[in-house]
Amino acid sequence: MTLLQFEGVCSAYGSARVLHDVSLSVSKGERVAILGRNGVGKTTVVNTCLGLASMQSGRMAFLGRDVKAVRTFTAARSGLSVVPQGRRIVSNLTVRENLILGGAPQRKGRWSVDEVFRLFPILKERAETPGTAMSGGQQQMLAIGRALMSNPDLLILDEPSEGLAPVVVDELGETLVKLASGGMSILLIEQNFGLVHKVAERYYVLSKGSVVEEGKLAGLSMETLKKHVAV
């Protein structure tokens, strides 16, 4: 089943068009990456999904249904969960409260506060700590845990390695692989080649708002992947 599909999507912020004729897809159980330099439109893919960027033409479908957007205020209960760039932890809430904030009670599934604590034991230790009082890596764990709380059909992560030490990025990769092995469908928007190589099965490369390269990662070396992205 195809969870998310773009067909010839053009989208913009006001009069400034950013995406040009973008086509991509993520199927159930897949791990797909979108690669590209800063400013090429990667985050605009997410914002188009959420209606924060306006889709001017083309077709977008989620869970097999054509949509103009999966709005931010309905995304969680619709089955789409986003770990945003910069994490956006709510500063005046504890770790536990930030997790509860991500819940969608009408969606049933594996993920609960206790299950997130099993995945990230450090969050259990710091459950009553303000969410922003933790390290960057721990905040990223919290952001992922919060996104999982809605038991999504598709998990989108926007630049999750940003600002993290290499050892923390490695741990993040292991976590995403673990989630994928449990059946989670993942769209990873990322510049870190090592993380993409570890997690994803397929990739798209964006340049100047257009898909200029796509393929499978199996058998593709990290050096070759870097050459594909150097466009």
Image (cartoon, rainbow, N blue to C red):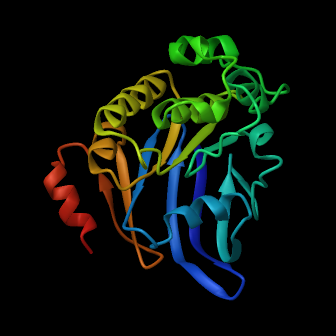
Q: Where is residue 87 in the image (x, y as percent from the top left)?
A: 59, 44
Within the image, what quadrant is residue 227 found in? bottom left
Left or right relative to 212: residue 218: left
Q: How many labels sit on residues? A: 0
The residue most toward the front is 133
Please tell me which residue lies in front, 55 or 111: 111
Q: Where is residue 150 in the image (x, y as percent from the top left)?
A: 72, 30
Please tell me which residue lies in front, 175 or 87: 87
Tell me which residue sits at (71%, 39%) in the image.
91
Left or right relative to 165: residue 82: right
Task: Give the vertical position of 112 relative to 138 (above or below).
Answer: above
The residue most toward the bottom is 15
Q: Where is residue 7 in the image (x, y as percent from the top left)?
A: 57, 68
Task: Give the vertical position of 17 relative to 183 (above or below).
Answer: below
Left or right relative to 156: residue 66: right
Tell me which residue sits at (52%, 36%) in the image.
140
Give the quadrant of the N terminus. top right
Q: Where is residue 88 in the image (x, y as percent from the top left)?
A: 65, 46
Please tell me which residue lies in front, 63 or 196: 196
Tell me which residue sits at (46%, 39%) in the image.
30
Task: Give the vertical position of 175 relative to 17 (above or below).
Answer: above
Tell me which residue sits at (49%, 33%) in the image.
135
Give the quadrant of the C terminus. bottom left
Within the image, what quadrant is residue 53 found in? bottom right
